[in-house]
Image (tube, rainbow, N blue to C red):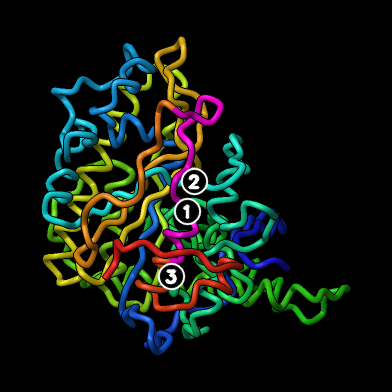
Amino acid sequence: MKRGQFLLGSLSGITVVANLDHVFAQALAYSTVPGLPGGDDRVLVLVNMQGGNDGLNCVVPHGDDAYYRLRPSLAIARNDVLSIDNQVGLNPQMKSFKAMYDKGMVAIVQGVGYPDPDHSHFRSTEIWQTAAPEKYLSTGWLGRYLDDANLPSENLFNGVAISQVLPEVMIARKTDVPAIAQLNGYGLLSDRNKSASTTYTELVTDKSLPFSSPYLSHVAEIEDHAQRGSEELPKLVAGYKTDASYPATPLGRSLALAAQIVGSKLGTRVLYVQHGSFDTHVNQRGTQDRLLSEFSDAMKAFYDDLAAHGNDKRTLTMTFSEFGRRAAQNASGGTDHGEAAPLFLIGGNVKGGMYGTHPDLNRLNDGNPGFTTDFRNVYATVLERWLGRPSTPILDGSFPQIAALA
């Protein structure tokens, strides 16, 4: 049976969904590799700006006349940009985020992408999440980190995806990661009906069944572990008192739960949340501005909450999106699938500022801003300088690091 999220069909009318096959246990410390700077209690939060966030209207090249030629009605006016310098600035809806940048909490990595980019949502998402542009893999780069990091195998919460389904980036060979959309919905569907739960338990423990299956005992173990895990998590985070005003948005709720998990010291090393969709083919300004405003305000609340509990310096957030958008606007007031775009590294231990080179809008790659930073450079930096693990075996190659982390 493949690890990860799977559907265990219907049995006597009982539908069972499981994400895991190990029970939660009290988290134990793990050791980073000697000589690497990653701290034992550090956490990475990965934010997927799904759908393809337009980099040019997010980190705006307001000093480049080509930007205004390419986007006569979609470009953000120079006077509206939250200027960082005379060349670039942030979208005007990102005021809270700009304040974090001014405090040195945000590193902006420009022109991030990969060779021979794919413009399909599905394939490009897979490439970013597996870190394998040239081949197909069945594990994600953070899943491989979880397998490599010598974390306690009995701990259910080494990694947590705050989402309806397990993203590919968290799929591992040896480590199971729960996908938890919200605390009050975490558990088996059969457990919502007492008689269904009892019937299922009787079925999987019945020794007189007229057939045998190598999977039945495993299914029973999963049901038992999932049930106990869903009972334990709300208790474990119940003592955490949120100390920030989160926006009432899906991202705000996800980050509030992420702060609970980080602050409850469950041994969690990686968390995944998602935001979007940024697939803005039509009327882009309204949709992207709203989503960037939600991102900005939720991220400020998240770090205010973390800081109030002394967790801001042990929590790094990294954003990604499967691609940016094309340089020129389309006829529908939007932009189509593109290539390179900026990403953000956020946290109390980040060396804030601008990194990498902004794509040259006068030298486009078939109408797209070309990449100037391979995303695996960023991943290698996060793995080695934050999580304290060698990046070469996880990324299947050696990639130069950037200077955004101490």
* Quadrant placement of the N terminus: bottom right
Residue at x 25% of width, y 22% of height: 76
Identify the mark at residue 113; answer none if there is no mark.
Answer: 2
Q: Are marks 2 and 1 in contact (CB under 8 Å)?
A: yes
- Residue 26: in sight, yes or no? no
Question: What is the magenta range?
Answer: 363-380
| Left or right placement of residue 97 versus residue 325 in this view | left
The residue at the far right in this view is 210
Residue at x 52% of width, y 70% of height: 226
In the rendered structure, which amino acid carries the disc numbered 2? Gly
Q: Which residue is mark 1?
A: 375
* Quadrant placement of the C terminus: bottom left
Residue 366, given in percent of the width and then of the height, sits at 56, 26
The residue at the far top in this view is 331
| Left or right placement of residue 124 versus residue 39 in this view | right
Q: Are marks 2 and 3 in contact (CB under 8 Å)?
A: no
Q: Mark 1: few, some, or many residues within 10 Å (few <14, many ≥20)?
A: many
Residue 370 shown in magenta: yes
- Callout 2: SS: strand
Q: Image quarter for residue 25?
A: bottom left
Residue 130, given in percent of the width and then of the height, sits at 58, 57
Identify the mark at residue 383; answer none if there is no mark.
Answer: 3
In the rendered structure, which amino acid carries the disc numbered 3? Leu
Residue 152 shown in magenta: no
